[in-house]
Image: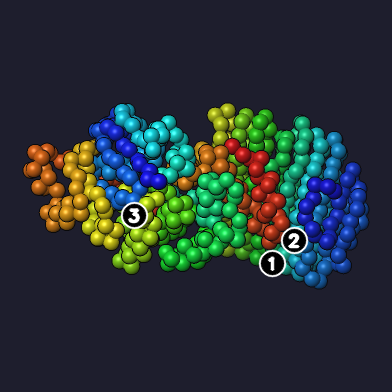
Amino acid sequence: MDNFEFDSPYYICFKDQECLKSSLPTGVSYLNQQLIFENKEPIEIRIIYILQQDQQLTMTFQFEKNVQVDIIETKMLQKNASLKKIMNLKQNAIVHMFNENNSCHEGHISLKEEVYLQRDAVCHSGYAELSDGSVQGEYRYYLDGENADARVRMAILSKQQEKKNFEVLIQHNRPYTYGQMDNYGVVKDQGHLKIDGIGTITKGQRGSSSHQTNKIMVFDPSCVASANPYLYIDEYDVKASHAAAVGKMDEEHLYYLQSRGLTKKQAMQLITYGYLKPVIEVVDNDMLKAYFEKVLSKVGA
Amino acid sequence: MMSTLLIKNLHVNVGEKEILKGINLEINTGEVHAIMGPNGNGKSTLLSAVMGHPKYQVTQGEILINEQDVLKMSVDERSRAGLFLGMQYPQEIPGVTNSDFLKAAMNARLEKPISLFKFIRTLDKNIEELHMNENLAHRYLNEGFSGGEKKRNEILQMKLLKPQFALLDEIDSGLDVDALRVVSEAINSMRGDDFSCVMVSHYERLFELVKPTHVHVLVNGQIVKSGGYELVEKIDKEGYEWIKQELGIEIQEEEEKQPIILESCGKKEQLTHG
């Protein structure tokens, strides 16, 4: 537990497919890889996953009606490990989740999430994907009740020989649902990064909104990057937008900051930090901000 | 101690085209220089080339600060050597807050980083003096700022960074009367033995408020006339025609290209600016 500098009183830590230790507030219970939230008061909880080589873990989260939960998660996976999470949000459950992949491994790991939102449920997630190693990630959100609201932000760094592929899906299965994703990536060295953003509005889901932005900033000539937005819409009365861009850091931005005395490296760091930082805004936590600033120094230049 | 910025026989190209054709200038701390001249004759190019914008290639000549070779310095080294360019079109940088940026810029020239308390106090005082929005510190750098706010933000940076040589490129454009007064007071408050400034402007009003000690007229990439404040008055009354006649030169006037801002409709901008 030495890596964790957060001072949340409530936490649960999984190691080798079992609960290693936990301190859970009233209204939160854990049994057989299932966490159930029935808390009356809003809570913040830290969750840590430690998986050894080739291990697999599937976790289910039940958020009962009207709960409010902030989650700060850290994932530390070894080679070929895979983690799957299934989250069910009942009516009016509000979940804000910051997710950090802090793995360091050779080979690749697999991360999957399925999030089901019922009527008036809200899930805002931030994924900080700055891990060392290749990653295959699939995050799927299903809006299964009217007024359900899912927002996803990603900040991804792919460097050295890492290969990172992410697919983010928000599927609207009921009318008047809201989905938004903002996926930002930085690629350095010989890194690979592919982001597929998928917004699906099925037939009859009038009044729904599906928005997405996918942006990748490329530092070196040998980087490989693609940002692909997909919108599958089978209904007329909806709002939808998408934006995708892959490009270099703006030279004029660098010049402006350098003209104030920042070295090129400092300027690049400041711009990159600003580019990736919105991911922490899903959870209101000052410690997180300070911690993330430190973590981002590895983005460097 | 007096410092000197010396520009000797400076020739500058943009692409294949020679814009500056042998500029000579000596600027000492304590002085305020005004550079005037018709559009498209090289005023902004001169300031940007001194700062080291990569678009401008110096093909001949020298720039020295106290005999140190500025042309060998990177842009950030020039800044730390005492140069500052208040830009005509300051960049908008999303995600970077003003306060993170200003702190980093101040720390770039300090041996020990400034304490948070001192930084906030200094920043608040200057924001107040410049009549700026107090939310400024938390806003992203120049993003969504009006033209006038951007210019004031340039002056704020100048005040915090305390350069020896401030180059101000049309710092008065986009400012209303009140803002111009505030900005002029800020520049005047910096005047002293340790500060000098080179201002480019088309308007006499700025030079009335910040009285230059030296005035130069830049035409066709060369300084064709230098003098005192009387030159400003004469140009304000008579334009540049008399210079043409007196010196027997043709002035090539070019329309300055307006940058097209990405958020606005490119086609419409093109139509407006021809």
Res A116 → quadrant: bottom right
Alpha carbon of mark 3 to alpha carbon of mark 2: how far? 47 Å
Query: Callout 3, which amino acid?
Result: Ile
Give the secondary structure at mark 2. Answer: strand
Q: Does any portion of residue A161 appear in the rendered image?
A: yes
Q: Residues within 10 Å of mark 1 (few under 14, many from 20)?
A: many
Using the numbered discs, state the Cα–Cα distance from disc 1 to disc 2 in whole angstroms.
17 Å
Q: Residues within 10 Å of mark 2 (few under 14, many from 20)?
A: many
Mark 2 — on which chain does it sit?
A: A
The amino acid beneath tag 1 is Asp
Decide: is B104 above or below A71.
above
The residue at the point 65 percent across, 37 percent down is A158
- Is residue A246 something one can see in this rendering? no
Q: Earlier in the sequence, mark 1 or mark 2?
A: 2
Q: Label 3: chain?
A: B
Which mark's residue is nearer the viewer, 1 or 3?
3
Q: Which mark is residue A70?
A: 2
Q: Where does label 1 land, which residue?
A: A120
Q: Residue at x 68, y 50 (%)?
A: A292
Task: Give me the residue at 28% from left, 61% from top.
Answer: B209
Query: Which residue shows up at 62% across the image and 39% down it?
Result: A300
- State the CA–CA distance, disc 1 to disc 3: 51 Å
- Report the side of A98 relative to B240 (left or right): right
Q: Nearer the viewer, residue A37 or B48?
A: B48
Image mark for residue B171: 3
